[in-house]
Image (cartoon, rainbow, N blue to C red):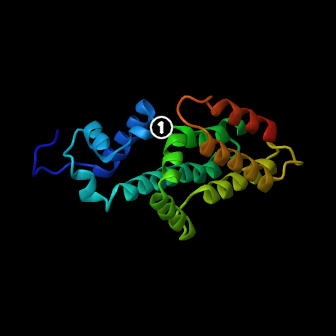
Amino acid sequence: MSPRGVATPNVRERLFAAAERVVERDGPGALTSRAVTTEAGCAKGLLHTHFAGFDEFVAELVLDRFARTAEGADALAGLAGQGTVTGNLGSVVLALFDAGGPALSGLAMARPNAALRIREAFQAGAPGFAAIEEAVAGYLRAERELGRVPSRVDAGTAALALVGTCHHLLMTSWPGTRDPRPAVQRLVTALVG
């Protein structure tokens, strides 16, 4: 545990990573501010020093993880013509399911104040499913122009199907249910293989 009065480096990421470990190990019902700070090995009040409350913490965690996935999706454009299309797409969309993604999404939706904060952030332009969908569609168009995706594939429709399926699986999966990643990989192959 960090001694009192000593700055804790990378507080947000440290708390976010701790929350993900708690959710993966013990499920979303075990996620409390005390569980997070205990897992992070820091003072109990640190979370509330950096966030207005636990709902804000959950919302910021979910928004941060979506932003990271959207950033990865933006990088797809630079991969056109490299690797495999299914591998490139898979790496981006499967990232949504890493580190307790389904459980964190479910947790956020079960907390009305966190869900509202997330919805407002998305409406204000925070990267989320729409940004990921747009990046995937752009990538598919680029690969189609290179001849690596069949000309019959409508990039926008394929992106919507892929991202929409991921959204559905995130909202309906939780620890202990069947791993959604193989289904997502099969969908990627069916859409562009």
Residue 121, x across and y down, in percent: 50, 66
Pick whichever, 36 or 77, lies toward us: 36
Q: Name the residue at 80% across, 49% down.
A: 144
Vertically, is 98 above or below 110?
above
In which quadrant of the rendered image does the N terminus lie? top left
* SS category of the residue bearing label 1: loop
What amino acid is found at the position of numbered circle 1 in the picture?
Ala
Q: Is residue 165 visible?
A: yes
Residue 115, x across and y down, in percent: 51, 59
Vertically, is 61 above or below 178?
below
Does 46 sit left or right of 67 as displayed?
A: left
Residue 159, x across and y down, in percent: 73, 51
Residue 65, x across and y down, in percent: 48, 49
Pick whichever, 81 or 95, lies toward us: 95
Does 130 sit left or right of 45 as displayed?
A: right
Q: Is residue 84 visible?
A: no
Q: Name the residue at 26% across, 56% down.
A: 48
**Residue ID for mark 1:** 99
